[in-house]
């Protein structure tokens, strides 16, 4: 079992109390991150970084529509007013840029700024090349080919292969003012300027490991989406009980991922608890490619999916999650009709392990790398402890853990199978999005095997590849849906992951927080929030 880390609640509380008094229209948020996400315009710390230090400040050609709660968040025009595939080339996309947009520093947003930022991510010899942001962008947009300026407000981007889902990749490319880099001279200094974006908030102060302060940008180009609060203060508070204490004492107004055993008392005390379905899966990634991996045998990968007591874990989480039987939720129309319908069936799991050569006399044993907190990680320590005991008792499987910092774990998702940093781990516990086929391609296409992309498992299934190619080249929604269903069936029947639960996105807030919408997305719209 894991040795629980000592709580930092007292130290964090002291830090929060030491802060100066805040204005009436200040919104204070406690994140799960252990540090402030990078502030250069393309933040690290996974999608929590993008949620708070990405989209509110920096924008892309394409943005998410975060206004709905009854469907998966669709795309909407951002810094591009519109886009389309070139009529004579399904690998080329034409983006028509929005006119009259200014960066926070007063610089013009135009085609030159787009090309400058794309060079920052994808051109190694450009003066503004940013190594960390490039690694993230290339993994999120593995099909990026070439790009060029057509005129001041039109750019074209070509992919290396047809990708009908390319706009769902372009949404992750955020743009920083070229003047920020020119002023600072290098990216380490850009983060301290602070950097300028085009979003509804601008950065005013960054204190590493302590806080970042955002101010409403009154010159925001979209008058209908100007922020209602004057200031947002973001604080890294990785321990759930420390976040809970900060909310109870009035030191913050909003916490990400409250501890499940504190929800009832929070409700009784009048705090607002929000939950909602969103495209999230909390899995273990199988290290199929390692030299001595037991997961080369599909029977072992399937067996563990029958050995997991998902309902028991949901109970531990006080109902703030739902069982996962695949990459998509079972209710999703694209789930398909796989042969395997994973549920807690230890007898079947043990029988399949025996077929693969693992018995009570020769038990399956392996190491999993996990984090103590992080974006979408929910409550990884107690959850993994539950799984460790569950797998041992249900199927005789021995699991040990290597607890590492969240960003290191994310980096290891792009490691080669036998990389020293994995320390022999045969699995990684990394929460992941399941929002669209662009993400599916990033995680599972053979061409995106690590270290190039996020296919850590080295998954390579011919039927999946055929379905993925079909949907990538198609324009007919019916053809795309049919191919997506087929692709997902292969992800279930030839599982690259141990599917465990889908998060229900719990947050806790003071009753002073008004106007929050919980979209079916990893991201949120801070512009709708007001404070009373």
Image (tube, rainbow, N blue to C red):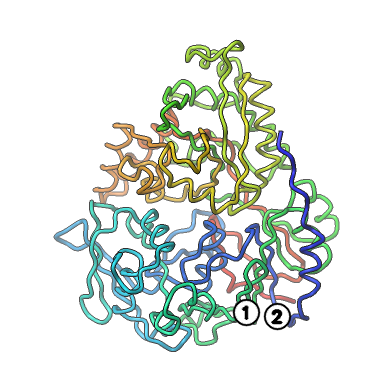
- Apparent side of residue 500 relative to residue 472 in the rendered image (left or right): right
Name which quarter of the figure residue 236 lies in.
Answer: bottom right
Say which mark, if any, is on residue 344: none
Mark 1 vs mark 2, foreground winner is: 2
Determine the residue positioned at 37% across, 70% down.
61
- Apparent side of residue 149 relative to residue 174 in the rendered image (left or right): left
In front: 65, or 150? 150
Residue 370 image offset from top left, x and y in percent: 60, 42
Name which quarter of the figure residue 249 lies in.
Answer: bottom right
Q: Quadrant of the N terminus?
A: top right
In front: 458, or 308? 458
Describe the element under mark 2 as helix, strand or loop. loop
Q: From this viewpoint, which residue is outermost toward the left?
A: 88
Residue 70 image offset from top left, x and y in percent: 54, 55
Determine the residue positioned at 71% across, 75% down.
531
The residue indicated by pointer 2 is 25
Say which mark, if any, is on residue 228: 1
In the displayed structure, would residue 372 be above or below residue 273? above
Describe the element under mark 1 as helix, strand or loop. loop
Q: Is residue 230 visible?
A: yes
Q: Quadrant of the C terminus?
A: bottom right
Q: Earlier in the sequence, mark 1 or mark 2?
A: 2
Residue 89 image offset from top left, x and y in percent: 16, 58
Q: Residues within 10 Å of mark 1 (few under 14, many from 20)?
A: some
Query: Is the Cβ of the residue at disc 1 closer than 8 Å to that at disc 2?
Result: yes
Q: From this viewpoint, which residue is outermost toward the bottom?
A: 106
Residue 44 image offset from top left, x and y in percent: 51, 61
In front: 480, or 240? 240
In front: 522, or 142? 142
- Apparent side of residue 531 relative to residue 120 in the rendered image (left or right): right
């Amino acid at each position: 079992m894991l040795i629980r880390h000592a709580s930092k609640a007292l130290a964090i509380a002291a830090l929060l109390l030491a802060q100066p008094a805040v204005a009436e229209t200040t919104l204070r948020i406690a994140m799960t991150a252990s540090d402030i996400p990078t502030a250069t315009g393309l933040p690290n710390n996974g999608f929590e970084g993008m949620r708070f230090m990405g989209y509110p400040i920096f924008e892309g050609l394409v943005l998410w529509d975060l206004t709905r709660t009854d469907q998966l968040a669709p795309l909407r025009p951002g810094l591009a007013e519109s886009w389309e595939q070139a009529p004579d080339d399904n690998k080329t996309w034409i983006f028509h840029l929005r006119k009259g947009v200014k960066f926070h520093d007063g610089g013009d947003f135009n085609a030159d700024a787009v090309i400058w930022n794309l060079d920052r991510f994808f051109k190694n010899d450009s003066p503004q090349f940013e190594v960390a942001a490039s690694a993230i962008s290339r993994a999120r947009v593995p099909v990026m080919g070439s790009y060029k300026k057509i005129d001041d407000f039109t750019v074209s981007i070509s992919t290396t292969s047809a990708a009908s889902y390319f706009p769902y990749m372009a949404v992750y490319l955020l743009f920083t003012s070229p003047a920020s880099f020119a002023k600072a001279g290098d990216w380490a200094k850009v983060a301290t300027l602070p950097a300028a974006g085009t979003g509804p908030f601008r950065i005013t102060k960054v204190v590493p490991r302590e806080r970042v302060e955002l101010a409403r940008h009154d010159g925001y180009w979209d008058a209908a989406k100007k922020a209602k609060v004057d200031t947002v203060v973001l604080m890294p508070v990785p321990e759930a009980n420390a976040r809970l204490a900060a909310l109870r004492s009035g030191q913050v107004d909003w916490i990400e991922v409250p501890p499940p055993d504190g929800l009832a008392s929070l409700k009784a005390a009048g705090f607002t608890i929000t939950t909602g379905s969103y495209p999230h899966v909390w899995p273990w990634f199988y290290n199929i490619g390692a030299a001595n991996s037991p997961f080369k045998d599909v029977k072992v990968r399937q067996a563990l999916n029958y050995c997991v007591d998902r309902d028991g874990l949901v109970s531990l989480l006080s109902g703030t999650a739902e069982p996962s039987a695949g990459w998509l939720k079972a209710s999703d129309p694209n789930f398909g009709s796989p042969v395997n319908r994973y549920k807690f069936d230890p007898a079947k799991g043990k029988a399949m392990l025996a077929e693969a050569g693992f018995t009570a006399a020769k038990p399956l044993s392996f190491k999993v790398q996990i984090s103590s907190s992080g974006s979408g990680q929910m409550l990884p320590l107690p959850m993994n402890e539950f799984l460790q005991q569950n797998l041992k008792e249900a199927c005789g499987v021995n699991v040990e853990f290597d607890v590492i910092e969240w960003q290191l774990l994310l980096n290891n998702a792009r490691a080669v199978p036998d990389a020293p940093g994995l320390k022999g781990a045969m699995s990684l516990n990394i929460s992941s999005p399941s929002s669209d086929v662009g993400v599916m391609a990033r995680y599972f296409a053979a061409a995106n095997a690590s270290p190039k992309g996020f296919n850590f498992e080295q998954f390579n299934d011919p039927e999946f590849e055929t379905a993925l190619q079909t949907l990538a080249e198609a324009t007919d929604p019916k053809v795309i849906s049919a191919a997506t269903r087929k692709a997902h069936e292969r992800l279930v029947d030839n599982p690259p992951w141990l599917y465990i639960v889908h998060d229900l996105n719990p947050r806790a807030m003071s009753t002073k927080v008004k106007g929050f919408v919980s979209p079916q997305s990893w991201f949120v719209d801070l512009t709708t929030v007001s404070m009373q």
